[in-house]
Amino acid sequence: MLTTFVLVYLVGWIVTTGLTFVASRRLADGPTTPRSTFAFSLLAGLVWPLMILGVVEVSSVVVYAAAKSWRHDSSVPDSWLGAGAFDGVVVPLR
């Protein structure tokens, strides 16, 4: 069973390192050295379970933002929003 966990971790490390290396080479804003890119990719591969958690977290924020933008506000009459809307309801504590 421990062998399975180690194999899954190592395969995840290799896949994450490769994907991060390719993405960082393509999306780099300026000249980068392959050595620094590969070092960054190895580090990202080392902590790939945390990267998965980060991707899940970012996707949940994106879904929340999209759902909030699709929401339609109910129409509230302007008389409910005025300062005198609660005059008969609110009792002063004097």
Image: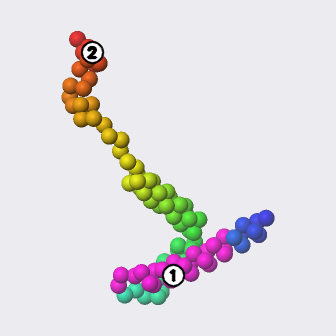
Determine the residue located farthest toward the left in the rendered image.
83
**Secondary structure character of the magenta stretch overall:** helix
Quarter of the image where one finds residue 27: bottom left
Quarter of the image where one finds residue 14: bottom right
In this picture, residue 92 sits left or right of residue 52: left
Q: Is 19 part of what is drawn in magenta?
A: yes
Report whether residue 87 is seen.
yes
Mark positioned earlier in the residue sequence (2 or 1): 1
Residue bearing mark 1: 21
Residue at image x 53%, y 73%? 44
Q: Is 24 part of what is drawn in magenta?
A: yes
Residue at image x 75%, y 68%? 4
Location of the C terminus by quadrant is top left
Element carrying mark 2: loop
Instruction: Decide: is 68 above or below 58.
Output: above
Q: How is the image coloured?
A: rainbow
Residue 38 image position (x, y, % from top left): 51, 83
Residue bearing mark 2: 91
Element carrying mark 1: helix
Q: Nearer the viewer, residue 78 or 65?
A: 78
Instruction: Decide: is 67 above or below 77.
Output: below
Residue at image x 44%, y 84%? 26
Residue at image x 40%, y 54%? 70
Mark nearer the viewer, 2 or 1: 2
Instruction: Decide: is 68 above or below 46.
Output: above
What is the three-letter code of the residue carrying label 1? Phe
